[in-house]
């Protein structure tokens, strides 16, 4: 039985106006407040415009606030970007970096992701570093090489289990309704942990949480979360409905 505490993270992506954020965040705060000593951590990552409202709604609860991206620089002439200090000032404790949509839509490299993750750690927040292969890469048998390369190139030097989380998200399963089979998910998660042993040492590798992302839903969450090396989920679509997101979290109870 693993001692790693599950993390259930919701990535709202570009969804939700302020009122919707207040309602969704408030419903989750009420749910988690109704469970004594919940055996999991929960974080929601709304759009930047909804951070303040979501923060107010979860204040005093065990729901943490996260952001979906950041800039690597502390401040400066970066129009349209947001720094980790600004996010921390908004109440964030987590920041997602390297999501496949950022890597694809904005051309982010492993080096860019690493620089952002380093900035998150420097601001005393927790980085959720995303990795994952495309359908073409999986079909070509390149999954382990691609994911392993992203892990090696995207994690900050000296990353620890206390300040860094990895999220494995097969690109072909994000928003498609397709889900990696339990065997496929466990195989990749175990390979990531083995590579972490070489990169960061056995103790850190054994303690670092590795989330599964890619169409995790209430009806498959329990099976995925029961896998030996799956330590939670980075949830997209299902995180936009309080009932569905909470039902996924309940699979940890």
Image (spheres, helix red, strand yellow):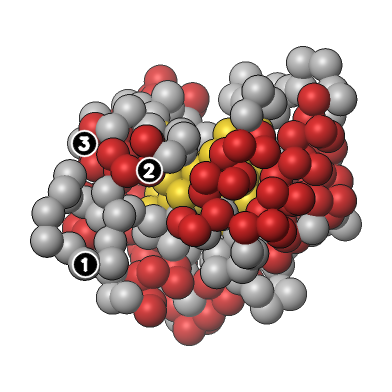
How far across and down, in percent of the image, does residue 184 sit? Answer: 64, 60
* Picture disc at residue 238: none
Q: Tell me if residue 200 comes above or below residue 105 in the rendering.
A: above
> What residue is drawn where x is 26% and y is 55%?
71
For the residues labelled 3 and 2, say whether their Cβ atoms are less than 8 Å apart: no
Q: Which residue is mark 2?
A: 87
Using the image as rendered, state which of residue 239 and residue 82 is in the foreground. 82
Q: Which residue is mark 1?
A: 79
> What residue is drawn where x is 58% and y is 76%?
172
Crowding near the residue tagged with mark 2, few <14, some 14–19, many ≥20 C-alpha atoms within 10 Å = many
Crowding near the residue tagged with mark 3, few <14, some 14–19, many ≥20 C-alpha atoms within 10 Å = few
> What residue is drawn where x is 39% and y is 69%?
102
Q: Tell me if residue 1 comes above or below residue 89 in the rendering.
A: above
How far across and down, in percent of the image, does residue 17 sit? Answer: 63, 64
Q: Mark 3 or mark 2: which comes first in sequence?
A: 2
The CA distance from mark 2 to mark 1 is: 16 Å
Which quadrant would the C terminus be assigned to in this image? Answer: top right
Q: Is residue 252 visible?
A: no
* Picture disc at residue 157: 3
Q: Quadrant of residue 64?
A: top right
Q: Tell me if residue 113 comes above or below residue 252 in the rendering.
A: below
């Amino acid at each position: 039985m693993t001692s790693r505490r599950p993390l259930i993270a919701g990535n709202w992506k570009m969804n939700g106006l302020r009122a919707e954020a207040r309602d969704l965040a408030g419903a989750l705060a009420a749910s988690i407040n109704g469970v004594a000593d919940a055996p999991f951590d929960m974080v929601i990552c709304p759009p930047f415009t909804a951070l303040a409202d979501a923060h107010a709604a979860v204040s005093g609860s065990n729901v943490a606030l996260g952001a979906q991206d950041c800039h690597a620089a502390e401040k400066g002439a970066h129009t349209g970007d947001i720094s980790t200090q600004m996010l921390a000032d908004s109440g964030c404790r987590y920041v997602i970096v390297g999501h496949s949509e950022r890597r694809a839509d904005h051309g982010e490299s492993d080096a860019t992701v690493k620089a952002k993750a380093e900035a998150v750690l420097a601001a005393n927040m927790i980085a959720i570093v995303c990795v994952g292969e495309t359908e073409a890469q999986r079909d070509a048998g390149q999954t382990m090489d691609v994911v392993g390369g992203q892990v090696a190139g995207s994690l900050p030097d000296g990353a620890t289990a206390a300040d860094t989380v990895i999220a494995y998200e097969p690109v072909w399963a994000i928003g498609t309704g397709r889900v990696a089979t339990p065997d496929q998910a466990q195989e990749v998660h175990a390979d990531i942990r083995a590579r972490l042993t070489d990169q960061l040492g056995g103790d850190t590798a054994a303690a670092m949480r590795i989330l599964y992302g890619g169409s995790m839903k209430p009806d498959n969450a329990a099976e995925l979360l029961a896998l030996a090396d799956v330590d939670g989920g980075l949830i997209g679509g299902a995180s936009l409905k309080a009932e569905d997101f909470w039902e996924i979290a309940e699979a940890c109870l």
